[in-house]
Image (cartoon, helix red, strand yellow):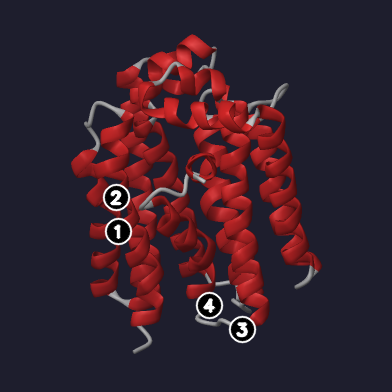
Amino acid sequence: MSALISIHRLEHPLGVHYACCAAWGACYATKFDLAVVLVVLANFVVTVAANVLNAYADVRNDLATAGKRRVATAVLEIGGHRVLELAIIEMTVALALAAAVSWRAAAGIGLIVLLYLAYNLEPVRLKRRGYAGPAAMGVAVWLLPSVTAYAAAGGHANPAVWLVFTGVTALAVGRGLWWAVPDREGDAAAGSITPAVRYGVRHAVNAATQFTVAGLLLLGGGLWLRFGPLWAIVGVVASGAFLLARRLSTTRLMLRHGFSIAVGGTVVLAAIPLLAQL
């Protein structure tokens, strides 16, 4: 059981993070019926299935990275082929859940699946292609699930909401760039040319700063237009608080402290549209 938890990356607080990523698009439409719940569940399942696929594809990288050897050990314990089969089954389940709602929901989940496949698998493997890696993850984890759930909940095209969704996606890219820095040696040893490997730590951190600032500005602007200045301040402060832990030196410390702070910001962002209606 512990090996399954490891390959799905469901250790606390990651499960809370995935649940918020899956549902917060629906939160901004403030509607939850059976169809929306099915799409949110599909978002959650495809996200954890992507973690399984990533665990399978990244065994070599994870063995070379101290903070991730536990995941690689779990893959070896279960067996690589079984891990890959599990990822395929779970992605299929996610597509089936979405298809039960509408073809649009299924198309959204299908795009997420394709992006995760391109991120993890050769010959494309966006993870080793510089900025394409964190950009793909930002879109797959944040933008597409948000839009899919928002549309399923009957959300209308709204500039403020698009600013929020785009801002959080840019913020996620910035976080990904920062948190990839401690993995630099393991990625280099495994041949993954991340921005930190290709351009160096300083360049990667500068780019992360630019994405983070842009993300916070877009997010704040969207929240201000939709809910007013008070909620904008709350959302920006909560989302930017992870910067307090940006200089932690290891993956384990980032997960324990930095990611916990980031998850708190994610919870706040999901709660804002619900609390603002009270």
Residue 96, by quadrant, is: bottom right
Mark 1 Cα-neighbour bin, 10 Å: few <14, some 14–19, many ≥20: some
Report the amino acid beneath label 2.
Ser
Q: SS at mark 4? A: loop
Report the amino acid beneath label 4.
Ala
Q: CA distance from mark 3 to mark 2?
A: 30 Å
Image check: 30 left or right of 180?
Answer: right
* Tag of residue 29: 4
Q: SS at mark 1? A: helix
Image check: 150 left or right of 203?
Answer: right
Residue with the mark numbered 3 = 33
How far across and down, in percent of the image, does residue 116 sit?
64, 40
Please say if the residues under marks 1 and 2 sit with CB atoms less than 8 Å apart: yes
Q: SS at mark 2? A: helix
Residue with the mark numbered 1 = 264
How far across and down, in percent of the image, does residue 153 sit?
61, 77
Please say if the residues under marks 4 and 2 sit with CB atoms less than 8 Å apart: no
Report the amino acid beneath label 1.
Gly
